[in-house]
């Protein structure tokens, strides 16, 4: 009988895992490989070349993609920063706030964007902004992304805070530190790996978001995902593969950094 403590012992686990990985990542590998194709053909290999990466920065569409990339970075940094601050405050309230009225409802509200389909969030955001007379633009994208990113930042921050005993703050206050000083000088530095992981995760979610952005962006405003989609509607071109590969590389770097911070934190706690 397979051991329940090791899922790898279950019959067929390896084969199913390999099959799922192929289904998930084979298209990404194809896009990555053909982004270095010297030919304009999407099916015939014409040799290894950086032509399409150069085209991204110097080609006829480079200005459009440059402005879209600036918009994406601006929104991602600002939205993830605000979302992380809100998530930090929510984590403190949920973990250190004790019992209070509405705590369960608050927890459900924080995690609601994770459970609701993204298309519903996109439509609801569009309806809300239209109802209050706010036209689409960078600010509406920022607001929608902030709300959507809060639970993604909250999860690693909350997990980190729950692993920290409250005796550290109690010891600081026993030594005449105020609650504010105990939080700023004791709890906050210990929580920093979780805060950084939450920020990075929220940043990637915002940077890669297409669905919500396309609903609330308004005319004339583009982020990198919407600019890519607009170009794809005119036909798939090799430079789109190059941009997609660059975005994939950035996402992999940031996700790996988030994992590394979490892993390093676990190793430090194990010591």
Image (cartoon, grey):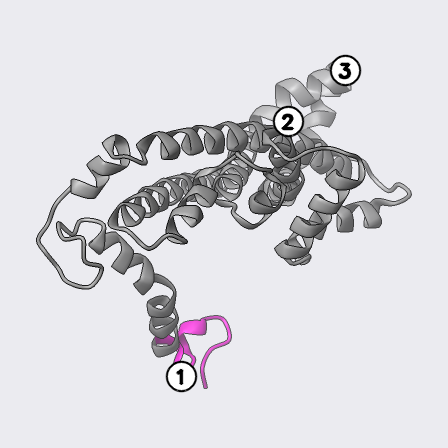
Q: Is residue 185 above or below residue 72?
A: above
- Which corner quadrant of the image does residue 152 belong to? top right
CA–CA distance in space, label 2 to label 1: 45 Å
CA–CA distance in space, label 3 to label 2: 13 Å
| Labels 1 and 3: the sequence-earlier one | 1
Q: Is residue 127 above or below residue 83?
A: below
Q: Which residue is mark 1?
A: 11
Question: Which of label 2 and label 1 is nearer to you?
Answer: 1
- Give percent across and percent down for residue 11: 40, 83
Relative to residue 244, is residue 175 drawn left or right?
A: right
Q: Quadrant of the N terminus?
A: bottom left
Q: Which residue is mark 2?
A: 187
Q: Is residue 11 magenta?
A: yes
Q: Which residue: 47% across, 77% down? A: 3
- Give percent across and percent down for residue 248: 35, 46
Relative to residue 236, is residue 105 drawn left or right?
A: right
Q: Residue furthest top?
A: 176
Kindly state the secondary structure of the residue where label 3 is placed.
Answer: loop
Q: Which residue: 26% across, 52% down? A: 32
In the rendered image, is residue 263 in sight? no
Kindly state the secondary structure of the residue where label 2 is placed.
Answer: helix
CA–CA distance in space, label 1 to label 3: 57 Å
Q: Do callouts 3 and 2 mark residues in contact (Cβ within 8 Å)? A: no
Q: Which residue: 43% across, 80% down? A: 10
| Labels 2 and 1: the sequence-earlier one | 1
| Labels 3 and 2: the sequence-earlier one | 3
In the rendered image, is residue 194 in sight? yes
Q: Which residues are magenta?
A: 1-14
């Amino acid at each position: 009988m397979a051991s329940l403590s090791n899922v790898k012992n279950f019959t067929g686990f390896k084969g199913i895992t390999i099959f799922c990985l192929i289904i998930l990542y084979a298209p990404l590998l194809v896009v990555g490989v053909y982004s270095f194709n010297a030919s304009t053909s999407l099916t015939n290999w014409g040799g290894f070349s950086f032509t399409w990466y150069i085209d991204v920065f110097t080609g006829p569409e480079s200005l459009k993609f440059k402005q879209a990339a600036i918009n994406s970075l601006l929104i991602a940094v600002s939205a993830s920063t605000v979302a992380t601050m809100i998530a930090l405050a929510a984590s403190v309230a949920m973990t250190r706030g004790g019992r209070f009225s509405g705590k369960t409802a608050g927890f459900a509200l924080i995690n609601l964007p994770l459970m609701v389909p993204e298309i519903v969030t996109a439509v609801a955001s569009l309806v809300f902004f239209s109802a209050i007379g706010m036209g689409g633009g960078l600010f509406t994208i920022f607001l929608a992304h902030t709300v959507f990113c809060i639970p993604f930042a909250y999860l690693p921050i909350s997990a980190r805070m729950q692993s920290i005993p409250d005796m550290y703050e109690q010891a600081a206050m026993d030594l005449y530190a105020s609650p504010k000083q105990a939080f700023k000088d004791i709890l906050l530095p210990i929580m920093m790996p979780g805060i950084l992981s939450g920020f990075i995760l929220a940043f990637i979610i915002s940077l890669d978001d297409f669905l919500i952005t396309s609903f609330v962006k308004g005319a004339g405003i583009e982020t990198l995902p919407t600019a890519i989609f607009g170009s794809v509607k005119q036909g798939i071109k090799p430079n789109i593969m190059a941009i997609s590969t660059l975005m994939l590389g950035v996402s992999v770097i940031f996700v790996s950094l988030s994992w590394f911070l979490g892993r390093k934190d676990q190793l430090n706690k194990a010591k």
